[in-house]
Amino acid sequence: MAVPKSRTSKARKKQRRAKNYRLETPALSVCPKCGEMKLPHRVCLKCGTYKDVEVITISE
């Protein structure tokens, strides 16, 4: 039966688990109409278009 020879320190244990807790930045794409950064496959919040079709009207 496999038994650890020595105790795993708190720092080593937390370093091993830290990879799973890391936050990743969301992927962004450029709106072809206004050039604003937006989430892919979603309506642009700046101009209200999706795939070059105006979906919602934005009042400024």
Image (cartoon, grey):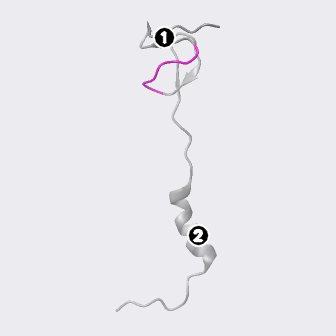
User: Mainly helix, strand or loop, the magenta region?
Assistant: loop
Judging from the image, what secondary structure is the residue with disc 1 in? Answer: loop
Q: Position of residue 33 (x, y in %)?
A: 53, 10
Residue most toward the left? 1
Magenta range is: 40-46
How crowded pointer 2 is (Cα within 10 Å; few <14, some 14-19, many 20+) is rated as few
Q: Nearer the viewer, mark 1 or mark 2?
A: 1
Residue on which the image places disc 1: 56
Rendering coords of residue 19 (x, y %): 53, 59
**Based on the displayed image, in which of its 4 quarters is residue 51 positioned?**
top left
Residue 37 figure quarter:
top right
The residue nearer to you, when weighing 42 against 4, is: 42
Query: Residue at 56% across / 62% down in the picture?
Result: 18
User: What amino acid is labelled 2 in the image?
Assistant: Lys
Q: Is residue 21 above or below residue 58?
A: below
Quadrant where the C terminus sits is top right
Give the vertical position of 6 relative to 60 (above or below): below
Q: Nearer the viewer, residue 29 or 47?
A: 47
- Quadrant for the N terminus in the image: bottom left
Residue type at the position of mark 1: Ile
Q: Is residue 36 above or below residue 21?
A: above
Question: How far, Cα to Cα, is label 1 from label 2?
Answer: 46 Å
Residue shown at 52%/7% (left/top)?
Answer: 57
Q: Position of residue 52 (x, y in %)?
A: 44, 9
> Residue visible at 56% across and 82% down?
8
Q: Residues within 10 Å of mark 1 (few under 14, many from 20)?
A: few
> Residue 42, percent across and down?
45, 23
Q: Is residue 20 magenta?
A: no
Label 2 sits on residue? 14
Q: Secondary structure at mark 2?
A: helix
Residue at 44 percent across and 10 percent down: it is 55
Whether the magenta-drawn stretch holds residue 42 is answered as yes
